[in-house]
Image (tube, rainbow, N blue to C red):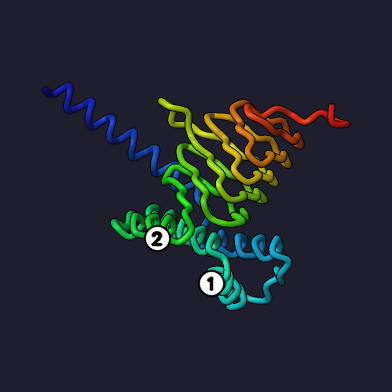
């Protein structure tokens, strides 16, 4: 019984260390929201250079009003910040509200760098997933897991993910790659490549 208790304690300590390390990778809340707002406004063709901290807050509030996805993204940021501080209950509530308001579900192990643009709702990301700055995520996108695995995709900077695309399993999508609408990515994507199809394959130069 003593050995079993020790194993349970060791497992609990390992889990606690894992979550502490993961949550330390999340960007500070206000810096992330400010950069998300800047990138969102840029892609929407709106003013994206902010004059002050107060201007950032006002523009973030405006974007939360006019864009369902931005509001959900901000709730994900708040959820991550509260979890890092050990706040109970409220992070779950924010997660549910993001799902209700925009059908955006970003799981607890997902780390999203500042400056990611979610075009509209209907987005799912879950598992040990990393999404870098400059990524554009279109509606109906899934970034998730293969059955029986806990590690999902790593999406490098400035990737564009088309409507309805699915990135599945521990794949790496290189910087500035483009994922076509409806593509299913189950293998690594080279930096700068454009992939389409099921399963996704690189588009050859000249259409060949």
In depth, the one of 96 and 173 nearer the eye is 96
The quarter of the picture where residue 31 lies is: bottom right
* Residue linked to disc 2: 97
* Residue 68: % across, % down: 53, 63
* Residue 82: % across, % down: 38, 58
Residue lying at the far left of the rendered structure: 1
Tell me if mark 2 has few (under 14), some (14-19) or many (20+) residues whose alpha carbon lies within 10 angstroms of its own: some
* Residue 99: % across, % down: 43, 55
* Above or below 23: residue 149: above
* Residue 144: % across, % down: 50, 37
Give me the residue at 54% from left, 48% from top. 112
Tell me if mark 1 has few (under 14), some (14-19) or many (20+) residues whose alpha carbon lies within 10 angstroms of its own: few
In depth, the one of 142 and 207 nearer the eye is 207
The quarter of the picture where residue 36 lies is: bottom right
In depth, the one of 73 and 8 nearer the eye is 73
Give me the residue at 49% from left, 45% from top. 124
Disc number placed over residue 129 in the picture, else none:
none
Disc number placed over residue 65 in the picture, else none:
1
């Amino acid at each position: 019984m003593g050995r079993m208790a020790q194993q349970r304690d060791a497992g609990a300590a390992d889990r606690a260390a894992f979550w502490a390390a993961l949550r330390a990778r999340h960007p500070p809340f206000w810096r992330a929201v400010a950069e998300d707002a800047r990138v969102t406004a840029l892609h929407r063709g709106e003013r994206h250079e902010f004059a002050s901290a107060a201007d950032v807050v006002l523009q973030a509030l405006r974007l939360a009003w006019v864009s369902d996805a931005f509001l959900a993204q901000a709730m994900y940021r708040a959820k991550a910040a509260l979890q890092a501080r050990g706040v109970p209950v409220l992070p779950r509530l924010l997660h549910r509200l993001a799902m209700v308001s925009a059908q955006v579900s970003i799981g607890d192990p997902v780390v999203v760098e500042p400056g990611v643009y979610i075009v509209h709702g209907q987005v799912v990301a879950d598992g040990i997933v990393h999404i870098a700055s400059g990524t554009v995520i279109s509606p109906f996108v899934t970034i998730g897991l293969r059955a029986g695995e806990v590690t999902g995709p790593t999406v490098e900077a400035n990737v564009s993910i088309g409507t309805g695309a699915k990135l599945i399993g521990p794949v790496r999508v290189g910087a500035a790659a483009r994922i076509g609408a409806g593509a299913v990515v189950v293998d690594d994507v080279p930096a700068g490549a454009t992939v389409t199809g099921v399963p996704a394959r690189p588009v050859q130069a000249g259409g060949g």
